[in-house]
Image (cartoon, rainbow, N blue to C red):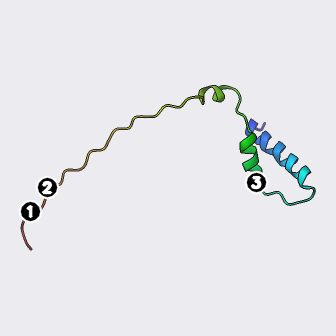
């Protein structure tokens, strides 16, 4: 069983082929159109409404001991 995205892409490709009337359809173009027209459904649509920004720990600079003043 295919997922909803794949089914949508197949449907979009069939629609584009019908409109093209024998013209060459590239998958890249089909995916662009499908991405614009696809609507998520189910659990993932409810949870994707608002995203949170994650806090990340800042990495401290490694301590430099400085120049020793010695010449080689």
x, y (%) of residue 55?
Answer: 40, 34
Element under disc 2 = loop
Quarter occupied by residue 42: top right
The residue tagged 1 is 68
Q: Please indicate whether residue 47 sits to the left or right of residue 59 in the image.
A: right
Q: Residue furthest right?
A: 21
**Mark identifier at residue 65:** 2
Q: Please indicate whether residue 52 sits to the left or right of residue 19 in the image.
A: left
Q: Are marks 2 and 1 in contact (CB under 8 Å)?
A: yes
Q: Are marks 3 and 2 in contact (CB under 8 Å)?
A: no
x, y (%) of residue 8?
Answer: 78, 40
The Cα atoms of the two marked residues, 3 and 2, are separated by 57 Å
Question: 2 and 66: which one is in front?
Answer: 66
Q: Residue at x 74, y 49 (%)?
A: 31
Camera-near label (3 vs 2) is 3
The Cα atoms of the two marked residues, 3 and 1, are separated by 62 Å
Q: Residue furthest left?
A: 70
Placement of 4 over or under 12, stated as above or below? above
């Amino acid at each position: 069983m295919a997922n909803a995205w794949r089914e949508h892409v197949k449907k979009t490709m069939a629609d584009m082929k019908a409109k093209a009337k024998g013209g060459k359809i590239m998958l890249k173009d089909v995916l662009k159109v499908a991405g614009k027209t696809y609507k998520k459904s189910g659990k993932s649509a409810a949870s994707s409404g608002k995203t949170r920004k994650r806090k990340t720990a800042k990495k401290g600079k490694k301590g430099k001991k400085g120049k020793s003043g010695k010449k080689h």
